[in-house]
Image (cartoon, coloured by chain):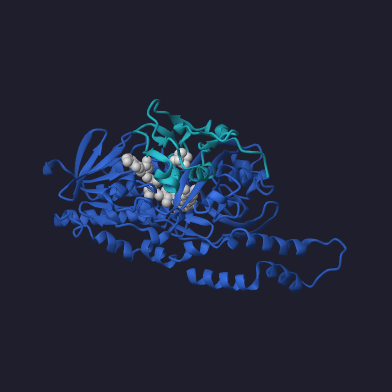
Amino acid sequence: MEEEAFDAIIVGAGLAGCVAAYVLAKEGADVLVIERGNYAGSKNMTGGRLYAHSLEKIIPGFAKEAPVERKVTKEKVTFLTDDTGVTLDYHNGRSQTSTQESYTVLRGDFDQWLMAKAEEVGAQFITGIRVDELITKDGKVVGVNADGDELIAKAVILAEGVNPVLGEKLGMVKPKVNADAMAVGAKELIELPKEVIQDRFNLSDDEGAAWLFAGSPSNGLMGGGFIYTNQTTVSLGIVCGLHDIGSSDKTVPQMLEDFKNHSIIKPLLEGGKLLEYSGHVVPEAGLNMVPKLVDDGVLITGDAAGFCLNIGYTVRGMDLAIASGEAAAKAVLTARANKDFSAQGLSSYQTLLEDSFVMKDLKLYKNLPAFMETPRIFNEYPKMVADIMQSMFTVDGSESQPLRKTLMKHCKEVGYMNLIKDGIKGVTAI
Amino acid sequence: MTETVNVDVKLGVNKFHVDEGHPHIILKDNPNMTEYRKLVNACPAGLYKLEEDGSIRFDSAGCLECGTCKFLCGDTILEKWEYPRGTFGIEYRYG
Ligand SMILES: Cc1cc2nc3c(=O)[nH]c(=O)nc-3n(C[C@H](O)[C@H](O)[C@H](O)COP(=O)(O)OP(=O)(O)OC[C@H]3O[C@@H](n4cnc5c(N)ncnc54)[C@H](O)[C@@H]3O)c2cc1C
Ligand code: SF4
């Protein structure tokens, strides 16, 4: 039996799984990826922005051959109320190194490309098969049960995404994750002619925009809205924290619809055609939800391990999935060299993560999730900046007020103490 | 405020392979209504429906497999939550 065992079986062909397969196969390990969808990426969605650094280190120059959509050069952040918007606009015309760049992506194409790269270097890949159970022997994971077949491996890498059914069954991930730790995202992919996208978003040929919205998109709950421009489509979506969803007077699909019809957004999408509607959960609790990462014969990686950062109004999980997939693969390679696949033999996974940006960034933003739950950030502050702007730009013949006085008036509405408190909390959380 | 959204129309553009006769999510017979209402709000596919007469209606066929209902309400309303069998369910062509 041992002779025929794979060095590793990987559950899930998302970014974490595909990268782990690539790194293992490249070093000659015998690896099998099992994906329940009909192709890599067929179950996966994301907002849209991939920070290149972690994949660039594994496949240098990947963006030249990968199906990336546009390189992000324009950043916008808008504070939105139902009928106003205050926007910060940043154009980056400076040259960037390849590890500083970021790209908009669509996962259907991107994940398939990444899986093909892993197959090129020798990884085996089966699709349309759901792994139902892990096989354990004397408390050690020794393989998987998929569609009635038993497949044996020296190590199993769980790259099953944000809903780690198998990790829960093993007891490595706490089964009833607190809803506070989760947000839900919904997205529309809207088709528009290339020139129209470039005109409306002020972009040249391969340039892209990343545009984040705080305030009304998530109906005042923790979350926000986003727009990412692709070649001939626009990704438009919202993310909304789940812990107060019961008291919301709007459903999540309604939030997205109202966001899409906001007077700032609507003209940008005029004439567009809906190509796809998608939804997905985002792990939001950062370091507070990271599970047991290694056990005898098994490792957990990517979203399944909670490696996702909610920094303000944006979500970052793809570069973490890639880096943690790589770390899991390296730990399996070490275990293979030492012929020890026990928790101890695989423990370099933990060390590799501790030494990488994954754990460092998770630690840095450790207190941010709690800070983000301050409701003022998502309803009162966007209104405050809008009111300040309105006072500045409205001339109607009534007596003008000195700017200082105007500012004070609007800050007073939120409460100075709150502003100071949130300011301090915000800074210390970061 | 815009018009009430019709999520079914949006789901209509998606590609689904429905596993007829094998629903992957099954509700309990008498689900807790406070919990159920959370899902009326949270399910991105709008599958947890509340009729005018107060009755509930749910069909897992348009499920996006996001997991929200499992995380949010778990066994307070769910008899079963699993991923559809391999090859079935939502198939994102773009993602
Ligand atoms: C709305 C939204 C916006 C986001 N925006 C961004 C962004 O702009 N930038 C960013 O970096 N991150 C973003 N993220 C986060 C990012 O998408 C995730 O962190 C990332 O996709 C995680 O990758 P993964 O490989 O861990 O998991 P996934 O991509 O979820 O892959 C898991 C795979 O496992 C498979 N699988 C699961 N169970 C089984 C089983 N039992 N048998 C076989 N196969 C199985 C699934 O089918 C799937 O293919 C966003 C997320 C959401 C929801
Ligand atoms: S998994 Fe998501 S889309 Fe499916 S029923 Fe539950 S909440 Fe709705």
| Quadrant housing residue A375 | bottom right
Q: Residue furthest top?
A: B20
In terms of depth relative to the viewer, which is nearer, A250 or A390?
Answer: A250
Vertical placement of A21 versus B9: above or below? below
Q: Give the colour chain A carries in the figure.
A: blue
In terms of depth relative to the viewer, which is nearer, B29 or A352?
Answer: B29
Taking the image as shown, residue A335 lies to the left or right of residue A287, namely left
Q: Is residue A66 visible?
A: no
Q: In what quadrant of the picture does the N terminus of chain B appear?
A: top right
Q: Position of residue A159 (x, y in %)?
A: 33, 48
Q: Residue furthest right?
A: A397
In terms of depth relative to the viewer, which is nearer, A411 or B70?
Answer: B70
Tell me which residue sits at (60%, 43%) in the image: A254
Q: Is residue A133 visible?
A: yes
Q: Position of residue A346 (x, y in %)?
A: 22, 57
Q: Position of residue B46 (x, y in %)?
A: 53, 38
In terms of depth relative to the viewer, which is nearer, A213 or A166?
Answer: A166
Q: Give the colour chain B carries in the figure.
A: cyan
